[in-house]
Amino acid sequence: MPQVTTAFTPDFVTTMRRALDAATDRVPVPSRTPATKAKMAQRIVRSAHEGITDPQQLVAIAVAEGTEPAL
């Protein structure tokens, strides 16, 4: 996976963290593994790097990523 080199403001890092927490609460309990949560976090960071900054969109993207548990 390529490295993301975008610098995010502390406030936006907080926004991404809240999006991850909200998304984690919306995936099925069996999918709430550390590996799946890491996969969801990576998707949030990639999306933010691509210019998506809306918290609701970040949550939706992370939920979609978390519906399939990481192996």
Image: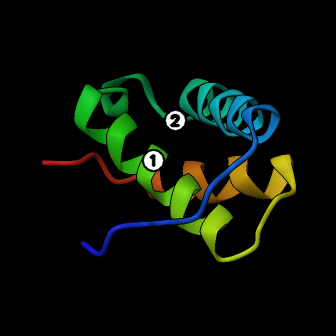
Q: Is residue 3 left or right of residue 7?
A: left
Residue placed under numbered mark 2 in the picture: 27
- Image side of residue 9 versus residue 30, left or right: right
* Above or below, comparing residue 25 to residue 71 in the picture: above
45 vs 23, nearest the viewer: 45
Residue at point 60%, 35% (across, down): 20
> Looking at the image, which residue is at 34% across and 68% down?
3
Quarter of the picture holding the N terminus: bottom left
Identified by mark 1, the residue type is Met
Counting residues from the start of the chain, the first of labels 1 and 2 encountered is 2
Above or below for 19 versus 62? above
Residue 50: name its quadrant: bottom right
Instruction: Measuring from the top left, give residue 12's x and y in whole percent.
Output: 77, 41
Side (left or right) of 32 relative to 49:
left
Q: Position of residue 9 (x, y in %)?
A: 75, 43
For the rendered model, the colour scheme is rainbow
Q: Residues within 10 Å of mark 2 (few under 14, many from 20)?
A: many
Q: Residue at x 54, y 56 (%)?
A: 45
Number of numbered labels in the structure image:
2
C-alpha separation, residue under disc 1 versus residue under disc 2: 10 Å
- Say if mark 1 contacts mark 2, CB within 8 Å: yes
Q: Give the class, few, some or many, for how many residues have Cα within 10 Å of label 1's Cα (few <14, many ≥20).
A: many
- Secondary element at tag 1: helix
Picture quadrant where residue 60 is located: bottom right
Which sits in the foreground, 43 or 26?
Answer: 43
Q: Which residue in the structure is indicated by mark 1?
A: 40
Q: Position of residue 51 (x, y in %)?
A: 75, 73
